[in-house]
Image (spheres, grey):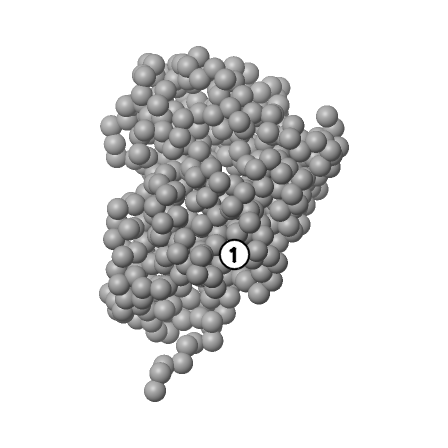
Amino acid sequence: MAKQTDPRLLQAMQAIASGQSTQAEELCRLVLTERKRDDLAMALLAQACNSSGKYDEAMQLIKSAIAKNNKRADYHGLLADMLTTQGDFRGALGAYDKALKLQPNHHGVIAGKANTWLRMNKPQKAIQLVEPLVKKGGEDLTISIVYAKARIEHGDSESAADVLLARLPATQEPIETRRTLYFTLGKAMEKAGEYKSAFEAYEEGNKLSASGFDLDACVKGHDDIIKAFPVDSFASMPTSNNEDTSRVFIVGMLRSGSTLTEQIIDAHPLGRGLGELESLPRLLSNTFGEDSLSAQWSALSVAQLDVMASEYLLKSSCKTNEKIFVDKQLGNYQFVGVVKKLFPNAKIIHCTRNPLSMGISCFAQKLPPHTNSWASKLNSIGHFYNEYMRMMRHWKACLGSDILEVSYEELVENQESTTRKILEFCGLEFDPKCMEFWKTGRTVLTLSQDQVRKPMYVSSIARHEQFGELLDPLIDALGV
């Protein structure tokens, strides 16, 4: 008699399908407290952890699930997905092949393998893998989506759009799959020059995204930080004795060229990009809890600041020989003052971009579920941008030339001179390798992972001009 699946794990599956990784994680951990060797609970928890960025734990869990039950194709497929995320494409392809040996027609695994080929910039291999299923018909929607992505990369956006249009409205599919469908369709339409149709697809994808941006709460939070670090007394406030000179913090908004900037530094023999670290936000959360920054920061002693600085360095340590280490957590735009008080020698790079192009780029991007609630509506994007810029103007008033502004447009149009400026600011000599940043083979775990594997291109400059009056809600909110 077959073992009945725990109802809590069925709920976890539904939570994962709808992007509720935290809920899924809680359910799986509850099951594992009662049945420590439940392989399905391990595998689902691995999937939830991977979605929330807990990559090491996710990898341990899926390997444990496979050790308990190595006959499940979906377990090997999930391992392959994780290996792809971490940039181990060869290992991923091997894991996919093991899965397909167990279940040759597993559409999820086939789609995953095709996505790996895309990550390797080999769209033709992805097409060859999935095209027979598309021509046969009746394929899983994930197959249609990855086929469309491959067609877009292969320069055939019209065919990509046709494949996806045939699958609409897909109301019976999981919400995250539908989101991917609409955002991919939008990209296909935009590449084909059908900007109104592209916008409509992006709009549908965003309607399925978690919203509820609270502008008042955002303003209140920024007000509190500004109160904690007054411009007229910032220089005289207590500063740690930490003499570390290795840290560079890149801040800004999504889609501002921040990953590109980090990749340029990482391409230098003495530079290392650490990605979007949670070290500083977690440090502040652990130190202050729910209390406001303004209520507690002024009471901190130099000794306490020294302890906080040491704790950050311990949590973000990197045992390599580079001279410069980059923390690209964009949300640290709120905590520039904190950074300079903990690390007076730290470098701050602020990545900027035309707010209209950046706005449509955010709107057109499938962001992780239940994150960046401001990004699903054009007017919210505009309001958030204004608030973020208010914070950056405050830090500029506090720090002046201690912050380097890097314009995305300037970087793309004047690559060498801007690259030299970035490296000089970081205390690095110019190196020609930084001009060919896409050749490093580095794993990038951000939304721009595909862009930084290619040379710079100018097509994204003034991207907003193609959408005309469709961007009026963004323009009105920005006040431009």
Residue 208 lies in what quarter of the image?
A: bottom right
Residue 397 lies in what quarter of the image?
A: top right
Identify which residue is drawn at 44% across, 70% down: 9
> Dot 1: few (<14), some (14–19), or many (≥20) neighbours within 10 Å?
some
Q: Quadrant of the C terminus?
A: top right
Identify which residue is drawn at 26% across, 35% down: 319
- Is 89 on the left-hand or right-hand side of 479? left
- Nearest the eye: 288 or 110: 110
Identify which residue is drawn at 70% across, 42% down: 216
Residue 269 lies in what quarter of the image?
A: top left
The amino acid on which the numbered mark 1 sits, given as a three-letter code, is: Thr
- Nearest the eye: 64 or 215: 64
Residue 349 in the image: above or below residue 274: above
Residue at numbered disc 1: 177
Element on which disc 1 rests: helix
- Nearest the eye: 363 or 253: 363
